[in-house]
Image (cartoon, rainbow, N blue to C red):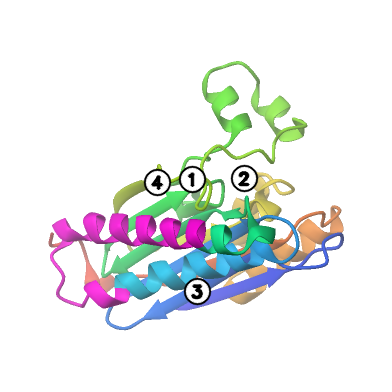
């Protein structure tokens, strides 16, 4: 397995409110988060999200966990983290309104479960096609799904940064949990909207196809986002060589 990740403040922002985490111990967890809120509070929210969710998952998951229990464990991890972020903001009034996206995948062998809230994304490059595995929880994405705006209009919409779901916003968290099966040759990519707001899917696909190194591909994406204005923090995480030919198909 080859992993490349880069997180950058960008050109405009003074603080990087993105965060990420990688955990490998018989299984793998990859997480990215994009915080929001004044002062340093977005940074606090994203850091709390990745740390609390991964800690809860590590406590209740092991190499031999029943796959049918995965979604419930991750559901509990997300909701506990949401509650802790709300409690922190309540105790630190300068952080009222802080929140964060959180997008993650747990993997063992060829089986995975995605946990997702917000507009950070997970893609898979499979058979030369780039497939978005998550659905953006944003105002513009909802307008596009309803057919009220075109894809071209969505790219330049003035409210493209407005998200409709996030951790730390409401007592009721509407996160999604998606089981997936991985295939030999798959390349995974997790990223925040600092990447996807400035680089289209075709360009992301071409970079993943052209650049063999996971680290260099992540660097190329962040550099391109900065060349195009870098008005937001940007994080790209790329995982190659997920499965060897000997690991074959899923046994679940």
Was residue 73 drawn as part of the magenta stretch in this picture? yes
Residue 108 appears in the figure = yes
Q: Quadrant of the N terminus?
A: bottom left
Q: Residues within 10 Å of mark 3 (few under 14, many from 20)?
A: some
User: Residue 207 location in percent, x, y?
Assistant: 65, 59
Identify the mark at residue 175; answer none if there is no mark.
4
Residue where numbered disc 1 is placed: 132
Query: Could you say whether the residue bearing mark 2 is in a helix, strand or loop?
Result: helix
User: Residue 69 location in percent, x, y?
Assistant: 17, 59
Q: CA distance from mark 1 to mark 2?
A: 9 Å
Identify the mark at residue 207; answer none if there is no mark.
none
Q: Taking 159 as reference, is 133 left or right?
A: left
Query: Could you say whether the residue bearing mark 3 is in a helix, strand or loop?
Result: strand
Question: What residue is at 73 percent from the left and 61 percent from the top?
Answer: 233
Q: Quadrant of the C terminus?
A: bottom left
Magenta stretch in the rendered image: 58-87
Q: CA distance from mark 4 to mark 1?
A: 17 Å
Q: Nearer the viewer, mark 4 or mark 1?
A: 4
The prevailing secondary structure element of the residues shown in magenta is helix
Residue where numbered disc 2 is placed: 201
Q: Looking at the image, tell me whether mark 1 or mark 2 is earlier in sequence order.
A: 1
């Amino acid at each position: 397995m080859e992993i490349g990740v880069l997180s950058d403040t960008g050109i405009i922002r003074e603080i990087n409110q993105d965060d990420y985490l990688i955990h490998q111990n018989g299984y793998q967890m990859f997480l990215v988060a994009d915080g929001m809120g004044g002062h340093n509070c977005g940074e606090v929210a994203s850091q709390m999200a990745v740390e609390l969710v991964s800690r809860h998952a590590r406590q209740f998951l092991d190499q031999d966990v029943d796959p049918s229990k995965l979604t419930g464990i991750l559901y509990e991890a997300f909701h506990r983290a949401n509650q802790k972020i709300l409690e922190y903001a309540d105790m630190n009034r300068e952080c009222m309104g802080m929140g964060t996206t959180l997008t993650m995948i747990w993997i063992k062998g060829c089986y995975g479960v995605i946990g997702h809230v917000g507009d950070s994304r997970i893609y898979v490059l499979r058979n030369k096609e780039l497939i978005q595995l998550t659905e953006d929880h944003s105002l513009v994405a909802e307008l596009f799904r309803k057919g009220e705006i075109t894809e071209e209009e969505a790219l330049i919409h003035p409210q493209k940064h407005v998200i409709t779901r996030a951790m730390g916003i409401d007592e009721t968290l509407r996160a999604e949990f998606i089981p997936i099966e991985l295939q030999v040759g798959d390349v995974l990519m997790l990223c925040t909207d600092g990447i996807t707001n400035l680089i289209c899917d075709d360009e992301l696909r071409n970079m993943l196809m052209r650049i063999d190194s996971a680290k260099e591909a992540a660097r190329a994406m962040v550099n391109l986002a900065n060349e195009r204005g870098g008005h937001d923090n940007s994080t790209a995480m790329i995982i190659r060589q997920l499965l060897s030919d000997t690991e074959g198909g899923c046994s679940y």
